């Protein structure tokens, strides 16, 4: 890669002068410093994708004795842009900037006491054609470019085993941590849906944002204090109290508004800075918005693993590969049990809170696959977010939404495929649809496009209401 010169407003270097680092060309670091590491006595650095979910996950880790913190996001975007080529997708640039900005701050704060080995940067991965699977490899190369950062480990969980936490903590605590972490994801989704449900109808501007910020802190305390004991009853009791209080913020005199669904790439649709606070802008023009959940992706990973294991079982049976047959059965039991647990608790949590306030339930992934099969539009054999987005859009239509927005990084292949398949269908059905690709620039026509989309959504609302 030649040489890398460091000389910018952020002083990530061992001296005030620019540092020149010669690359060795060795790939050893990609295996030695990227993977699963024991987090005892380490500081786990979590990038902020979804604000609420990220903080609840960090609180869960802390409850199990892991020093976890969510890094401040978007403040280091200039560094992210500086150390990427532009061919990476936008989330890679943002998270690259987040970790460099954080470590720069730690170096300045601690001085000579800074020790790179104290930190583990949390960056999972997935397989398939999405570039997300290469983030931690690329970011490893960038961190290795700085001698003082080369010993920062990257904790990389993988979708291949449904993001198993084995290797991060004592083996006898892995199951409890995994189950509590998943619950934190579902509760984070509920708080987000509570925010989007009440903010368009709040009695006083700003009440909802303040309320949700306070509620997030309450749930952080609940997960940190009760999560390691798996006292889910007490955690959900706190959640129910929050939903009841949130219900009182709604002004009953404000009439219902057009319902807009948001789908797309998980990071962009969840990260409010990356999507330029899209949901708030839609609300400004008269929408009530429901974004696809984080738990949907977690469920999909387990479902896809189960689906693949079943296909392997059929293949091994056909070819009488007895040794491989046993492995396939073990995978079916593992992924099947994981999916059952997730769907059971997700349904349980949603059932409890929706008795207090109308919130949209999540879709079961199996139902999403049936939707695609029924309409013959795509297949789960191509394992990307395209499966979830296309099926999610069709479910939005069935459930009476008045418009759908597809959010994704500029040049994102799965979401571009979604657009190519769905746009003609939405035109035929007369349901407003909008693609919103993002990079670090501000699109000059964005506001006009959103206003036009919302005008169409209001017309759809007047004609159809929320009829499925």
Image: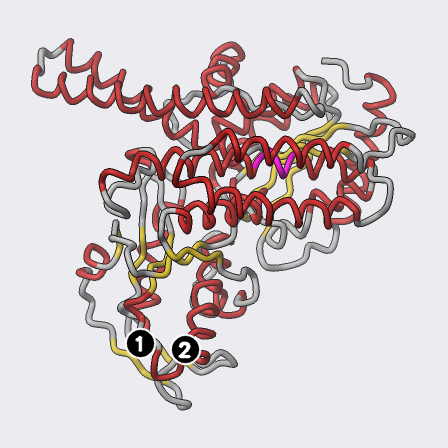
- Which percent across, then down, holds residue 14? 35, 84
* Residue at which label 1 appears: 148
Residue 125 quadrant = top left
Label 1, secondary structure: give it.
helix
Residue 151 lies in the magenta stretch? no
Q: Tag 2: Cα neighbours inside 10 Å, few (<14), some, or many (≥20)?
A: many
Whether residue 22 is situated above or below residue 72 in the rendered picture: below
The mark tally for this picture is 2
Q: Quadrant of the C terminus?
A: top right
Numbered range of the magenta stretch? 189-193
The mark nearer the N terminus, 1 or 2, is 2
Whether residue 133 is situated above or below residue 118 in the rendered picture: above
Label 2, secondary structure: give it.
helix
- Left/right of residue 405 with respect to residue 154 in the rendered view: right
Please report the residue visible at 82 percent of the width from the left and 36 percent of the height from the top. 201
- Which percent across, then down, holds residue 64? 36, 47
- Which percent across, then down, holds residue 195? 69, 39
Q: Tags 1 and 2 in contact by the CB under 8 Å rule?
A: yes
Residue 18 in view, yes or no: yes
Please report the residue visible at 19 percent of the width from the left and 58 percent of the height from the top. 32
Residue 114 quadrant = bottom left
Towards the viewer: 199 or 433: 199
Residue 128 in view, yes or no: no
- Which percent across, then down, holds residue 466? 77, 18
Q: Tag 1: Cα neighbours inside 10 Å, few (<14), some, or many (≥20)?
A: some
Whether residue 420 is situated above or below residue 444 in the rendered picture: above
* Residue at which label 2 appears: 107
- Left/right of residue 184 with respect to residue 40 in the rendered view: right
Whether residue 150 is situated above or below residue 198 in the rendered picture: below
Please report the residue visible at 44 percent of the width from the left and 54 percent of the height from the top. 46
């Amino acid at each position: 890669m030649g040489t890398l010169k460091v000389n910018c407003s952020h002083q990530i270097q061992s001296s005030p002068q620019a540092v020149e680092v010669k690359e060795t060309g060795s790939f050893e670091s990609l295996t030695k410093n990227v993977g699963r590491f024991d987090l005892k006595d380490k500081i786990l650095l979590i990038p902020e994708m979804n604000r609420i979910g990220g903080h609840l996950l960090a609180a869960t880790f802390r409850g199990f004795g892991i020093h976890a913190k969510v890094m401040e996001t978007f403040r280091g975007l200039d560094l992210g842009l500086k150390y990427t080529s532009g061919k990476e997708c936008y989330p890679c640039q943002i998270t690259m900037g987040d970790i460099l900005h954080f470590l720069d701050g730690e170096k300045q704060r601690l001085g000579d006491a800074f020790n790179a080995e104290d930190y583990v940067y949390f960056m999972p991965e997935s397989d398939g054609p999405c570039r997300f699977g290469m983030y931690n490899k690329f970011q490893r190369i960038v961190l290795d470019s700085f001698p003082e950062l080369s010993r920062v480990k990257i904790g990389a969980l993988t979708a291949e085993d449904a993001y198993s936490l084995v290797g991060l903590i004592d083996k006898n605590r892995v199951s409890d941590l995994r189950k509590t972490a998943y619950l934190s994801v579902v509760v984070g989704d509920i708080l987000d849906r509570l925010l989007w449900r009440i903010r368009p109808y709040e009695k006083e501007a700003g009440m909802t944002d303040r309320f949700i910020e306070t509620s997030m802190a309450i749930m952080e305390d609940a997960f940190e204090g009760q999560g390691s004991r798996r006292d889910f009853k007490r955690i959900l009791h706190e959640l129910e109290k929050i939903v009841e209080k949130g219900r009182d913020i709604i002004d009953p005199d404000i009439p219902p508004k057009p319902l807009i669904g948001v789908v797309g790439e998980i990071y962009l649709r969840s990260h409010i800075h990356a999507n330029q606070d899209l949901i708030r802008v839609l609300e400004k023009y008269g929408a009530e918005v429901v974004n696809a959940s984080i738990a949907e992706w977690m469920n999909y990973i387990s479902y896809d693993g189960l689906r693949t294991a079943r296909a392997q079982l059929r293949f091994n049976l056909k070819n009488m590969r007895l040794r491989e047959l046993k492995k396939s059965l073990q995978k079916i039991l593992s992924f099947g049990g994981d999916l059952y647990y997730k769907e059971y608790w997700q349904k349980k949590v949603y059932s409890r809170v929706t008795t207090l306030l109308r919130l949209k339930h999540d879709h079961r992934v199996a139902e999403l696959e049936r939707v695609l099969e029924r309409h013959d539009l795509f297949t789960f054999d191509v394992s990307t977010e395209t499966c979830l987005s296309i099926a999610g859009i069709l479910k939005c239509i069935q459930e009476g939404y008045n418009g759908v927005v597809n959010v994704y990084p500029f040049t994102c292949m799965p979401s571009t495929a979604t657009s190519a398949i769905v746009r003609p269908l939405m035109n035929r059905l007369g349901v407003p649809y909008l693609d919103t690709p993002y990079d670090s620039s501000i699109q000059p026509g964005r506001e006009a496009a959103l206003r036009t989309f919302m005008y169409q959504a209001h017309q759809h609302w007047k004609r159809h209401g929320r009829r499925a």
